[in-house]
Amino acid sequence: MDGRARGALLTAVGLAALLAVGGCSGLSGGHTSEDSAASAPDKAAPAGAAPAEAGGAKAGTGGGAPDLRVDQRSIIYTGNIRVRVDDVDAAARSAVTAATAVGGFVGGDERSSTGDNARAELELRVPAERFTAVVEDLAKLGRPERRSIRTEDVTEETVDLDARIITQRARVESGRKLLARASSIDDLVRLEGEVARREADLASLEAKKRRLADLTALSTITLTLVGSGADTSSEEEKDGTGFLVGLRGGWDAFVASLGVLLTVLGALLPFAVALGVPVAVLVAVLRRRRRRPAPVLSESLPVPAARSAP
């Protein structure tokens, strides 16, 4: 290889080396700039940005979970309280005032007797959010003797009713559209009956929804006011236990069972009379025939003479 060729080869090798070094430095510099650009917002962002993003991500992932908060559920509250007071009428007026002051009303009012034996039973409907406060106010009217509070969660039933109502409304609309396009009398009559049935089902579902909405929006409190001398032993026996309570329950069960037995016997008596009389007559006839004596022969049969030996 001459000197000119060797110089050209060295020049080519040097250029290739320069190009390789430049490319590597370019790649390294691009990666660094990207990292700087990516880290810039983190440095510039406020301290609360990361928690906010984390909270947003958590909220986004849990968006499909059911809302279990009490204020978002449909709950029916029912209360029963008995209070002994000195003046039943005055306490009843105070109870009515306490219910109406929070936006409720009186659903029932029953009073009996006067004086120390007076008694009043009030059914109060109050907003559900004021239920506990009203119960506490009623307990302060005198000396509470009994209190019971019950709750019923009807959230699932409410959601199910909503879905069924939406579906039924769609069915009613589709039936009406088909009815509008009916081309014959037979189709018209058949579709009218179908639409009427669907509308009736929809009205029934909507009535159930209104009933549930009323029970969840307004709670029911049954208040029993008794005078200072009123006897409540009979009410205690209804919920109590003991020998007398068991004896009374056993006697009631015995009387009920005896009544059922007499009812069954009364139902079977006509069949017994209709079938028993002919059977009894037949049995009597057969017995009489068996008791008749056998006929006796009046003449004895002739005895053959003995033969003499030959």
Image (cartoon, rainbow, N blue to C red):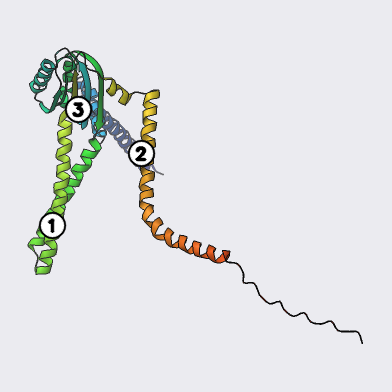
Q: Mark 2 points at which residue?
A: 256
Disc 2, SS: helix
Quarter of the N terminus within the rendering? top left
**Precedes in sequence: disc 3 or disc 1:** 3
Of the two numbered discs 2 and 3 in the rendering, the one whose residue sits closer to the viewer: 2
Direction from residue 298 to residue 234 in the image, left or right = left
Q: Amino acid type of disc 1?
A: Val
Above or below residue 194? Residue 84 is: above
Residue 299, quarter of picture: bottom right
Quarter of the view holding residue 77 = top left
Residue displayed at 17% across by 45% down? 205
In the rendered view, tell whether residue 198 sits above or below residue 128. Answer: below
Q: Where is residue 172 in the image (x, y as percent from the top left)?
A: 13, 53
Of marks 2 and 3, which one's residue comes earlier in the chain? 3
Check disc 3 and report the residue beneath it. 71
Mark 2: few, some, or many residues within 10 Å (few <14, many ≥20)? few
- Which element is circle 1 on? helix
